[in-house]
Amino acid sequence: MTPKQKEDLILKAISYYGIQSQYDQFHEEVGELMTKLNHFKRNRCSLEDVIEEIVDVEQMLNAIKLLHNIPEDLYQIIEDQKYNKLKQQMD
C-alpha cells in the first residue's frame, strides 16, 4: 500500500468511526503493545505478536497526526531534535 493509500484509508476511518474513537483506539493499542512487550519478556508471545502491536500503534499515531494536521516537515525537525538530544546524552 502506498503512503497516499494509507493516508486515504486513515482519513476514511476517521470519517467513519469519528474523532473520539480514534483517541480511544490509540489508548487501547498502546495498552495492548505494553501488554505484549511484557508477555514477550516472559516468552509468552512471539516477536510477530509484538510487531503486530507496534504496527497498530504506528497506525494510530498516523491517525493522530492527520487529525491535528501535523506538517511532516515540522514533525521531522522535532524528531531530529529528539534524536540529537539522545545522541548528546550518549556521548
Image (cartoon, rainbow, N blue to C red):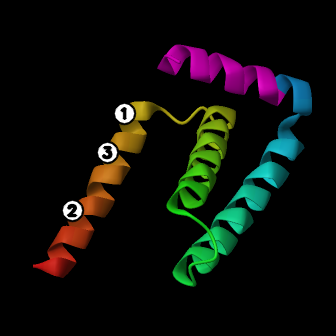
Counting residues from the N terminus, which is met first, the one under dot 3 or under dot 2? 3
Q: Which residue corresponds to mark 1? A: 73
Element type at mark 1: helix
Q: Label 2, label 1: how many angstroms apart (C-alpha)?
A: 16 Å
Amino acid on which the number 3 mark rests in the picture = Ile
Q: Name the residue at 80% across, 29% down.
A: 14
Residue 50 % position (x, y)? 57, 60
C-alpha gap between disc 1 and disc 3: 6 Å
- Whether residues under marks 1 and 3 lie with C-beta atoms below 8 angstroms apart, the answer is yes
Q: Which residues are magenta?
A: 1-14
Secondary structure beneath label 2:
helix
Q: How many C-alpha atoms fall within 10 Å of the one at disc 2: few (<14), some, or many (≥20)?
A: few
**Residue type, mark 2 in image:** Asn
Q: Using the image, determine if residue 34 lies above or below residue 9.
A: below
Residue 70 horizontal side relative to residue 57, left or right: left
Dot label at residue 84: 2
What is the secondary structure assignment of the residue under circle 3? helix
Image position of 13 with respect to 39: above or below? above
In front: 34, or 82?
34
In percent of the image, x 60 and y 32: which residue is there?
Answer: 69
- CA neighbours of label 3 inside 10 A, class few (<14), some (14 to 19), many (20+): few
